[in-house]
Amino acid sequence: MHEVYEKTSLTPKRVASFGGYIDWITQPSVFKHYPDFLFSYTFGEKEQLQMLELSRCITSSEIIGAKPYNKLNTPSAGNLHPIELYVQIRSVKGIISGIYHVDVGTNRFVLIQEIQEDGIETAVGVFHKFEGMIFVLSCVPYRSEWKYGERAVRYCYLDAGHQIAAIEAAAAINNQETTIMSDFDVAALNALMGFKGEEFTCAVIAIGEKTQKSVKSLSKSLIHVAPTDYSDSKGFVPNVIAEEDVLKSKVYPILATKEAVLQRRSARKFEDLPMAQDDFEHLMHMFSRSAYPLTCYCVVLRDDVKEAGVYVNGKMIKSGVFTEMLIGLLIDQHFIKNAQMVTVITAKHFSSDKLMLAGAFAHKLYLEAELRGLGFTGIGAFYDEKMQEFLQMKDYILYVCAVGK
Ligand SMILES: Cc1cc2nc3c(=O)[nH]c(=O)nc-3n(C[C@H](O)[C@H](O)[C@H](O)COP(=O)(O)O)c2cc1C
């Protein structure tokens, strides 16, 4: 994946050549929609499905330029949402057992296929009936490639990481535990899901119990529905994603409330005010310890709570006020100006797994910031090599976050 990192890195030259104009009329559809003749449950109809609603739902809606502009409980680079969510439900009282699509655009759980003696289990490496829910999370690269070109590889996985953590958060609120499934043939699962090369599984998460009851494989693939109204991919992004593995690592435990999930937003500006000392220390502690196997470089921008400078694992490695430098490294994103700190999430290896972990870690931070009344945002646009030079290291830079009042 080193070549993919290089090829998807941002340099001043690449940013300049990409151009600024984008014709939003050509945006591919943001939400996949299965045919209306399929049976569905509406959000809010069944209490047993509340946890699912909290995993993926629209939390803000407006009309911009005669088009709906929806924001979800999960953030997304450019609000493009290149993620889809499916769930197999078995033996949940009052719910037809089957494979559902979470149709977030119409607030419905659409039953793609009923199950009984058969199911998706064998395709995700479970050889007995699994009672509960098996989530299949896919990405639709063209939704992001349309705007971001090759860089979309990274944004798809970061967005997927947010979705994974959103499921973790919903499970935690319901006192449920999750298991990551990764020991199966991903290409075979993609075929079974009816994805046909436009959509790719990136994580499988289960909540429930393995039983000793035997289960049959599905006799045929699910019906194919295109995830976007059109596609004009140059090939690089889907080709990379088709070769990559699903999430393997266990993700971080999440602290959340229903309100925090529904209210989470990305900060668009920061007040020129210091953060409370205990909020600052709590975040610093999270940046130093909780991100393992990732490493966070924390750039404290303001001198008011702790000396400004760059910190790793709680230790200062460079002193100074680097606000202007950071704005430049983040491709002139001036809105971070009054943030308390900007954290750069890095890894020794560059892979889909590490990118998803970075997205999941940032999601955990979003929710903790929300609980503490702080502003937080993920930032995916930065000059990779210049950032490495600034931090005096060669590790891979995966994601950046800004937090403040
Ligand atoms: C992977 C990723 C990269 C992002 N990059 C940036 C960025 O570079 N600059 C920025 O201002 N916001 C960035 N965001 C925040 C999105 O713009 C924001 O999530 C989106 O507009 C939806 O708004 P919401 O998070 O309030 O729902 C990013 C979000 C994600 C998930």
Image (tube, rainbow, N blue to C red):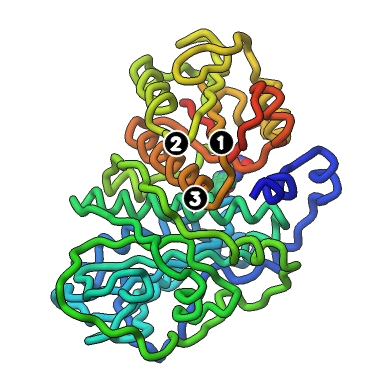
Residue ID for mark 1: 348
Residue type, label 1: Lys
Q: Residue at x 53, y 29 (%)?
A: 343
Q: Name the foreground residue: 114 vs 180.
A: 180
Residue type, label 3: Asp
Residue type, label 2: Pro
Q: Earlier in the sequence, mark 2 or mark 3?
A: 2
Q: Is residue 53 left or right of residue 208?
A: right
Residue ID for mark 3: 353
Q: Position of residue 178 (x, y in %)?
A: 27, 55
CB at mark 2 closer than 8 A to ligand 1? no
Mark 3: give few (<14), some (14-19) or many (20+) Cα within 10 Å: many
- Cα distance, mark 1 to mark 2? 9 Å
CB at mark 1 closer than 8 A to ligand 1? no
Task: Give the SS element for disc 3.
Answer: helix
Q: Earlier in the sequence, mark 3 or mark 1?
A: 1
Q: Residue at x 54, y 20 (%)?
A: 272
Q: Name the foreground residue: 59 vs 399.
A: 399
Q: Residue at x 58, y 59 (%)?
A: 80
Q: Position of residue 311 (x, y in %)?
A: 52, 17
Residue 241 occupies which quadrant of the picture?
bottom right
Q: Label for residue 293?
A: 2
**Are dots 1 and 2 in contact, CB under 8 Å?**
yes
Mark 2: give few (<14), some (14-19) or many (20+) Cα within 10 Å: some
